Every structure is written in C-alpha cells, then in structure tokens.
Image (cartoon, helix red, strand yellow):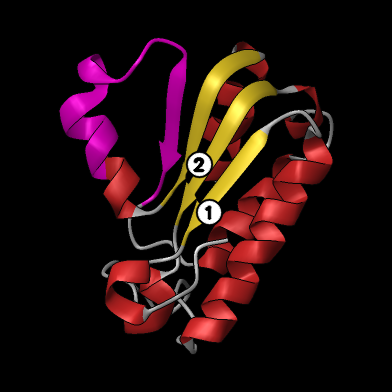
Amino acid sequence: HGHVDSLRLLLRSRSRLDALLLGDSHFERLQKHFAPALPRGTVVHAVGGDGVEHLLLRLHLTWGGCLATVHARSFVLLCGINNLIGGMRETPTRKSARCSPAQAAAGLQRLVDLLRAATAAASVTGHAAAACARVPRL
C-alpha cells in the first residue's frame, strides 16, 4: 500500500499540474536521474516492474476523492512493457500478467478512459511499449 499512499499524498498536495506522468521503470528512471530538468509543474509517479493492472489498481484505490480533484493539463501514461515481457521486480505475490500486445493496449485504453473520466479537460496520452511490441498508440 506504500505506492497507493504516495500517490494519494501526491494528488492531495498538488491539485494543479501541467503534466502528471504515470508509468513503470522508464518514468521512474526519468524522475530519479532527470527530476531537476523536468519542466515546472510536471510530476512523475512511477513504479518499476509495474504492469498495466498495477497502475489501474493504484488509480482505482486513490479514486476516492483524490484523483477527481486533480486538475492536470495533461496525463502521460507509459506502461505495458512488463505485461509483454514480464516485470523485472516480480515476486510470488506481485507479478505482471503476460499478455498479447492487443491485451496490453486494451489495458492502457482502460487507464486512458479512467483518467478522462476524472477530468474531461485533460489531455491523456498513452504509450504501451510501441517500439518493442507494435502496440498501437492510443
């Protein structure tokens, strides 16, 4: 529940954002190594090894009053690679479900729909490892 709690705190503390980047280790590394270079108003919440289902779960668990109050100009999602090749941080209790590119794209579409429902004015862009799996950009 640590990641859910950190997302709740993030969403409660920053109600106006230019961009909220959500995803897996690619965004996690971006924040770790390039946080000072990110544009002002850009916030990253990412967990290495995440699959689409993990991000969906975290967003559903924080939905209660938090996500609905966020006013972000844009959401950027980058996830799905761990669903295609398996997560690097898999444990017996936390494992990314391997699936086809079409299934990963469908999961990403659910994420896009959830975020669009949270704030109709936001731009939502989803990328699901298109370079290595030919997953369509949504």
The stretch drawn in magenta includes residue 43 = yes
Relative to 42, say whether 27 is above or below.
Answer: below
Query: Helix or strand or loop: what does disc 1 sit on?
Result: strand
Quadrant (top left/top right/bottom left/bottom right) for the C terminus: bottom right
Residue 32, given in percent of the width and then of the height, sits at 22, 32
Say which quarter of the image contains residue 7: top right
How would you rate the neighbour count of disc 2 (Cα within 10 Å): few for under 14, some for 14-19, many for 20 or more? some
Judging from the image, what secondary structure is the residue with disc 2 in?
strand
Percent from the top left, x then y, of residue 37? 22, 18
The answer to whether 102 appears left or right of 8 in the picture is: left
What label sits on residue 55 in the rendered view?
none
Q: Which residue is mark 2?
A: 76
At label 1, counting other C-alpha atoms closer than 10 Å, the crowd grade (few under 14, some 14-19, many 20 or more) is: many
Residue at image position (41%, 44%) is: 46
Tell me if label 1 and label 2 are in contact, CB under 8 Å. yes
Q: Position of residue 126 (x, y in %)?
A: 53, 54
Q: Which mark is residue 126?
A: 1
Compare marks 1 and 2 and give the one earlier in the sequence: 2
* Magenta residues, start to end: 29-47
Q: As shown in the figure, which amino acid type bears the numbered disc 2? A: Val
In whole angstroms, how far apart are the C-alphas of marks 1 and 2?
Answer: 6 Å
